[in-house]
Image: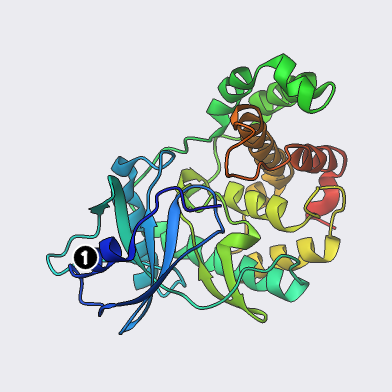
């Protein structure tokens, strides 16, 4: 469920009157996603996405996201820039929320990616990173390595162990390991930081769009590849590792933007960090989401399984 703020057809029609995009034909809430309220709009001039930003998106961050998408679109990357109204304004207000009208991109998200689809996604991520080499604005990663221990403390040891016996100690040990070895000398840039399969639009084996940049930030560039690897290369529950998907994703990325030797060596550690990051945020949501909330909680165990695989198979990035 991803429509937290309900907007009437009349309100949407009035909203669209600020833009040169035609008049409203239909509006449908989009169920995918968990961060914001999204509507697919069809007007007399085409299709658009209306997004209302909910509590996890700070309106102060929207100028960074807009600048990032505009930069990538100018560079030819397949991203959905936000649309300005007749006065040149992109950040609007609707139903008490900051809101933007966003370019619609065709394609669907795949639930069981093939190696060819993973290769295309890796290439698109590499193209994005190359385009961002000269992108100047910065935004701190609110889910970065420095914040993971605080997030674990907010979950609480007893609550973590309710999710899985011994989880609190496993997290504490991994935090100690990452604190000791986390790299501080790798190239940094703007990154997507959340490139799961549902944030990639595809038509057959072709990427048609990278979407949902609301975790984008400035961090270690290769960490973005590690996040994507953790998201794409395992079964949903994290118990199965898909080596062909892994090889294809890495090959695709390298064909667009080759890793340095230092980045290649760091990937196993960065992947452990990526797995821990999503383990912690899922655990926090699992603990703090009310039972009657209209949001499906995501199982933290799926990323504990990924973390354990990375801990025990550091050679998967060279296999």
Q: Secondary structure at mark 1?
A: helix
Q: Is residue 40 left or right of residue 88?
A: right
Q: Is residue 148 left or right of residue 84?
A: right
Query: Is 256 located above or below residue 159 in the figure?
Result: below
**Does any portion of residue 135 appear in the rendered image?**
no
Q: Position of residue 34 (x, y in %)?
A: 54, 49
In-front residue for pair 62/42: 42
Provide the residue designation for mark 1: 14
For the rendered model, the colour scheme is rainbow
Query: Is 317 located above or below residue 25 in the figure?
Result: above
Q: Position of residue 87 (x, y in %)?
A: 12, 65
User: Count the marks: how many?
Assistant: 1
Residue for point 78% across, 18% down: 169
The answer to which image quadrant residue 313 occupies is top right
Q: Position of residue 152 (x, y in %)?
A: 63, 22
Q: Quadrant of the C terminus?
A: bottom right
**Does any portion of residue 160 appear in the rendered image?**
yes
Residue for point 58% across, 38% down: 293
Residue for point 82% across, 40% down: 305
Q: Is residue 3 left or right of residue 234?
A: left
Q: Is residue 19 left or right of residue 198?
A: left
The answer to which image quadrant residue 272 occupies is top right
Q: Position of residue 27 (x, y in %)?
A: 40, 70
Q: Residues within 10 Å of mark 1 (few under 14, many from 20)?
A: few
Query: Is 172 located above or below residue 239 in the figure?
Result: above
């Amino acid at each position: 469920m991803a429509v937290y703020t309900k907007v009437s057809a009349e309100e949407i029609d009035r909203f669209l009157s600020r833009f040169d995009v035609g008049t409203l034909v239909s509006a449908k809430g989009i169920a995918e996603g968990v961060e914001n309220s999204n509507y697919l709009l069809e007007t007399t001039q085409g299709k658009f996405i209306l997004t209302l930003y909910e509590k996890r998106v700070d309106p102060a961050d929207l100028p960074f996201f807009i600048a990032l998408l505009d930069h990538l679109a100018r560079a030819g990357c397949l991203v959905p820039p936000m649309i300005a109204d007749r006065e040149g304004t992109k950040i609007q207000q609707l139903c008490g929320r900051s809101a933007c009208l966003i370019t619609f991109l065709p394609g669907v998200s795949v639930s069981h990616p093939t190696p060819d689809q993973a290769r295309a996604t890796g290439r698109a991520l590499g193209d994005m990173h190359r385009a961002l080499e000269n992108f100047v604005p910065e935004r701190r990663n609110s889910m970065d390595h420095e914040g993971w221990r605080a997030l674990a403390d907010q979950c609480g040891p007893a609550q973590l162990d309710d999710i899985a016996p011994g989880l609190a100690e496993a997290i504490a040990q991994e935090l100690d390991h990452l604190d000791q070895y986390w790299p501080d000398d790798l190239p940094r840039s703007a990154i997507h930081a959340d490139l799961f399969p549902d944030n990639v639009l595809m038509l057959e084996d072709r990427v048609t769009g990278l979407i949902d940049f609301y975790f984008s930030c400035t961090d270690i560039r290769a960490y973005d590849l590690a996040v994507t690897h953790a998201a794409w290369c395992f079964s949903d529950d994290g118990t199965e590792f898909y080596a062909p998907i892994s090889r294809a994703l890495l090959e695709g990325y390298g064909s667009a933007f080759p890793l340095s030797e230092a980045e290649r060596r760091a990937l196993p550690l960065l992947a452990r960090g990526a797995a821990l990051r999503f383990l912690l945020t899922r655990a926090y949501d699992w603990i703090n989401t009310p039972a009657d909330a209209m949001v499906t909680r995501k199982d933290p165990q799926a990323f504990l399984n990924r973390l354990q695989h990375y801990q025990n198979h550091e050679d998967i990035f060279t296999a």
